[in-house]
Structure formats: C-alpha cells, structure tokens
Image (cartoon, rainbow, N blue to C red):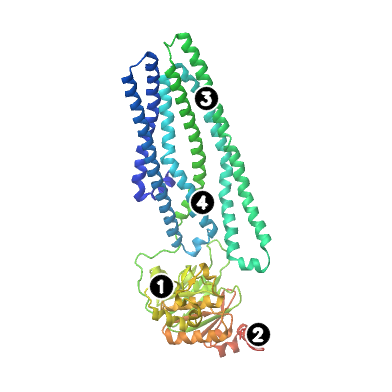
C-alpha cells in the first residue's frame, strides 16, 4: 500500500505545492472553527453577568473576524485543492497514456481496450476524488474530531461523558456499514470493463449490427451489463444510506443528553458548576464531533473504492514493455534486406503451440515479395516480426544485416511502413492524415503520393479536395478509398521496407496493378512485401512465398510455383476459372 501511494503521489509533480498549501489552510480553518464556540460560550456568560457594550462589541468583532478567516481559509483551500487534484488527475492520465504507447502487442494483449479506457477515465476519476478528499476532508475531519473532543472536555466536564457512549456507537456502526458496502463497490469495476467493451464493440461494428438487424440483441446485451452495475451500486448505496439515520440518532441523543443533564446541573448548582454558555458550546462541539465521524466514514468508503481503482492504474503503470531498446542501439538501417534465420514464434511463453516454426528466408533489398496462404497460416504474424511488434521465440530476424533487437525501436519502425487491410484514418483533414507518414511533406509530395496510390482522382472530386475533413476512423470514405489513402500515407515515409497486409483487397484488379506499377517507379530501392488473397496481386513478384499452418510450404516465382506447389496451383486455378471475380 505504501509503495502504491508513493507511486501515485509521484504524479503530483508541479502541483505538489498546492497540496501543501491546502494542508496548511485546512489546519488553520479547523483551529478557527473550534475556537469560535469557545469564545461564543464566554460571550454568553459575559452577557449573563452584565458585560459592557464596549466589551460586547469587541468580542463580536473578533467573532466576525474569525468567521471571515475561516471562510477565507475554506475558499482558498477549495481552490488549491481543486488545482492540486485536477493537476494530479491530468498527470496520472498522461502517464497512463504514455505507458500504453510504449507497450508491445504482448503487453496490450493482457489488457482489453475497454479495460484501458475504464482505467484512464473512471478509475482516474475515483483516485482523483479520493486524493481531493485526502488533502482536504481527510485532514479536516480527524483534526476537527481531536480538537472538538479536547475543547468539549475543557468546556463541558461531566457533560463530555456523552461522547464515551456516542462515539463508539457511531464509529462501530459506520465501520460496519462501510465494510458491508465494499464488496459491491469492488465488483463494479470489472463490470464497468464489460459495459465499456459492449459499447465499444457496438459502435465499431454498427454497420454489421444494422446489416443483420441485431439492434434489439445489442440493446439487451447493453441493458444486462448496465443493470448489473446498477444492481451492485443500488445494494452498496442502500447500505451507505444507513449512515444518515445512524448519524441523526447519535446527534439527537447527544442533544437530548446535553440539554437534559446540562439543564439539571445548571438548576441544581445555580450555575456554579456549569452555565448556559458551556451547554451551548457543548452542543456545537457535539455536532462537530459527530459530523467529523460521519465524514471519516465517507472517506473510508471512498478510499476503499479508490484502492481498487488505484490497483488497476498501478497495474498499467508498472507493466514493463516486453520490447525495450538495447543498451547501445543501432540508429541507422543500412538497407531493406530481410533475413529470417531458424525463426519460431509463439504469442506467449505459456502457449503450447508455435504460431510460426522453422522459418528460413532471405529477401534482398529492393525485391518485391508476395505472400499467399489460407486464413490462419500466420502471414500477418510473419511480417509483425520485421518491425519488432513481437520478438521471436527462437532464432533471429535481421533487417539490413542487423538483428532487429539491436535497433533503436523508433529507428526501426520509421524505416518499416505497414499498410493493413483495416487501416485507420484519424479525425482531421486528408492532408493531416497523410502527413502522419511525413510531417514535413509538401503539398506537391502529397499529391504525388496520392497519384501513385490512385487516390488523387477521388480526393479531387471532394468539394474541399485535400482539405476534406475525415471523420474518426474514416467513416465518411469507402473501404477502397481508405486503403488508397493509407498506401499514400506509407509512401510519403519513403521507407526501406513497405509491407502491404492485404491492403488492396477493397480495390479492383486494375487499380491494384496501377498501384504496384507506381511502387516500381516511386520506391524502386524499397523492399516491398505484399500479403494478398489474389494471385494477380503477387503474380509478377520477384519471390512468392506460400504459407501453411505457420510454416513456409513453398517459395519461388509464379511459373515455378505452378509446377511444384499444389496449394498455389489450386488458388490460381480457382481464381482464374471463368475470370477474376474481382474484375
């Protein structure tokens, strides 16, 4: 727990001074608030004894000054507390986001995207609120409790014995309520993950949902997840709601005891042992003590809730990327040559089966390589090892004659551009998206890349041309248009290695051929690896690799594979019988 708190508080950084100021202001505010009833009690007794108007005015002005001082401390404390807690949450979210950006795919696989979203939103909000309560209420409540009890015994004498009964009853009751409520609060967080996952999945697959008329099913699924959270929260809130009647019971018991016993003592002693001023002060201190206990119970509930959130946040912050830079990394990629030497790979050390096995492959710089294979043959897994999205389990992968594990990660990935089948476009203009490939690209270079990717014509057809705004995920362009823009984005990088992972599947064969022809002219020295389902996309490649069940079944040129690979021959015959269905 100590290490977790220290890890979280490290995120305060430049906002630490505001937390310290808040602490000082809270101490001063509590001191003033417990002083006011003491002075008020003296004022009541002095009035009873017949104080002069001058003394009365002086005491009244002092009380006004103290009230204004308390108000000022509270207001300033609220500002510094808000500044500190909001800054803390900002830094915490930033650190989480930066940590996630550093993760390898292996690390990301441990957390679902919905869970990461929950941790950066709901969990951070819970921790922020707990921090705010810690530096303000959690300081104020205990101090108020201690000061008020001390002052009550100074002022009330025998009357203070009421707290010997009330405090243990209230403290025990509040503790039991909080303890019962905690399991429900803890259960909620995992259900939040499932709720966010249902939302994310539904939004991403909205077209599929509507295409299959499954809106009612999705509503029911969301409703079930939402109801589970509501049920747990309702159960917990019902328990926490018992705080109020318990608090009221203790307050009224305290008032009745003080008033009845105090009145009897005043009458029986004639005001010699206790007077009216002391009774009024005891009532005020009693309320302060009980309110402090109530605040402490709420702090206990909130801190216990936030502990679960904090653990989830720390799990992300402490997660070390499985891919790290070597001690003395290589910062230059000589060329686009690729070597797979006795490579085997599995996604997890706990996995029983290898996704890739016994891969031996050499690709010269500048070659065009096609990769074919059925679903599940690990084509994508193979190319992910080139840019070191995963590390090999056995053997080595070399780029430019150097093991990819010896490169600086940014250097390697800046020289390997990957265009996926389902590439994403980000919200912003077309120019903004294309400059992800090269932030310094000129308008002329952007147009040239789009012409080579066969995207210029449709971009120019938009009213705003290259300044056309792209919605999040590229939902306002077609699949083929999105793929061509992503290819243009990769071309602007002028990488040493360009990988197309079935990224022309949404374009017709003529456009596909024109794109490949553009590669030869624009990036002749770049190694081009094309994963495709269509033989026509790789037919003229320098080398075609046929994969099956995680291994290389055959390699060679088109004519060679027609003779020696039954898998390649079957694919070719299926696609050419009666003409290409994509034509």
Q: Earlier in the sequence, mark 3 or mark 1?
A: 3
Residue behind mark 1: 414
Residue behind mark 2: 574
Residue 554, x across and y down, in percent: 56, 82
Q: Is residue 112 among what the camera can see?
A: no
Distance, label 2 to label 4, CA atoms, is 52 Å
Say above or below: 511 vs 196: below
Q: Earlier in the sequence, mark 2 or mark 1?
A: 1
Report the mark closest to the observer, 3 or 2.
Answer: 3
Q: Quadrant of residue 80?
A: top left
Q: Earlier in the sequence, mark 3 or mark 4?
A: 4
Distance, label 4 to label 1, CA atoms, is 34 Å
Residue behind mark 4: 122
What secondary structure is found at the residue carrying circle 1? helix
What secondary structure is found at the residue carrying circle 3? helix
- Residue 324 circle label: none
Say above or below: 369 vs 434: below
Q: Earlier in the sequence, mark 2 or mark 4?
A: 4
Q: Is residue 101 among what the camera can see?
A: yes
Q: Are marks 2 and 1 in contact (CB under 8 Å)?
A: no
Report the mark closest to the observer, 3 or 1.
Answer: 3
Residue depicted at 46% across the width and 44% down the height: 130
């Amino acid at each position: 727990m100590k290490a977790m708190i220290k890890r979280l508080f490290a995120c305060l950084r430049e906002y630490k001074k505001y937390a310290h100021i808040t602490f000082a202001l809270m101490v001063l505010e509590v001191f003033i608030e417990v002083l006011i009833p003491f002075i008020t009690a003296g004022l009541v007794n002095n009035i009873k004894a017949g104080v002069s108007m001058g003394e009365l005015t002086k005491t009244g002005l002092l009380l006004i000054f103290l009230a204004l001082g308390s108000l000022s401390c509270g207001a300033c404390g609220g500002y510094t507390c808000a500044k500190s807690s909001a800054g803390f949450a900002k830094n915490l979210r930033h650190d989480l986001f930066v940590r996630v950006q550093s993760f390898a795919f292996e690390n990301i696989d441990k957390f679902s995207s919905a869970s990461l979203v929950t941790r950066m939103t709901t969990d951070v909000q819970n921790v922020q609120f707990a921090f705010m309560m810690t530096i303000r209420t959690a300081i104020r409540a205990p101090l108020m409790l201690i000061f008020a009890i001390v002052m009550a015994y100074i002022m009330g004498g025998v009357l203070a014995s009421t707290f010997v009964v009330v405090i243990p009853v209230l403290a025990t009751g509040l503790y039991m309520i909080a303890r019962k409520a905690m399991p429900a609060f803890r259960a909620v967080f995992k259900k939040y993950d499932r709720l966010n996952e249902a939302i994310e999945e539904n939004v991403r697959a909205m077209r599929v949902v509507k295409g299959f008329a499954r809106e009612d099913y999705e509503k029911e699924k969301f409703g079930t997840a939402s109801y589970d959270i509501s049920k747990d929260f309702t159960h917990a809130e019902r328990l926490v709601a018992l705080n109020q009647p318990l608090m009221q019971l203790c307050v009224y018991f305290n008032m009745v005891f003080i008033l009845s016993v105090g009145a009897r003592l005043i009458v029986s002693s004639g005001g010699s042992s206790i007077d009216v001023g002391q009774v009024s002060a005891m009532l005020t201190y009693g309320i302060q003590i009980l309110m402090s206990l109530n605040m402490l119970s709420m702090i206990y509930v909130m801190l216990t809730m936030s502990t679960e959130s904090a653990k989830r946040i720390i799990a992300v912050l402490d997660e070390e990327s499985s891919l790290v830079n070597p001690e003395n990394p290589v910062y230059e990629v000589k060329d686009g040559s690729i070597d797979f030497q006795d490579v085997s790979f599995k996604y997890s050390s706990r996995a029983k089966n290898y996704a890739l096995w016994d891969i031996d492959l050499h690709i010269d710089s500048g070659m065009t390589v096609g990769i074919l294979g059925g679903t599940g043959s690990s084509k994508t897994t193979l190319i992910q090892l080139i840019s070191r999205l995963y590390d090999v389990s056995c053997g080595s992968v070399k780029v430019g004659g150097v093991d990819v594990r010896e490169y600086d990660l940014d250097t390697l990935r800046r020289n390997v551009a990957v265009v996926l089948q389902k590439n994403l476009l980000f919200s912003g203009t077309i120019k903004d998206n294309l400059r992800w490939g090269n932030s310094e690209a000129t308008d002329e270079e952007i147009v040239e890349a789009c012409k080579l990717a066969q995207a210029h014509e449709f971009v120019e057809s938009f009213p705003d041309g290259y300044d056309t705004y792209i919605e999040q995920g590229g939902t306002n362009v077609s699949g083929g248009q999105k793929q061509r823009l992503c290819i243009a984005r990769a071309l602007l990088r002028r990488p040493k290695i360009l990988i197309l992972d079935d990224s022309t599947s949404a374009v017709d064969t003529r456009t596909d051929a024109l794109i490949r022809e553009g590669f030869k002219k624009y990036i002749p020295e770049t190694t081009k690896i094309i994963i495709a389902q269509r033989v026509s996309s790789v037919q003229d490649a320098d080398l075609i690799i046929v994969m099956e069940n995680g291994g290389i079944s055959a390699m060679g040129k088109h004519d060679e594979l027609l003779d020696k690979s039954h898998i390649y021959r079957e694919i070719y015959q299926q696609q050419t019988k009666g003409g290409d269905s994509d034509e």
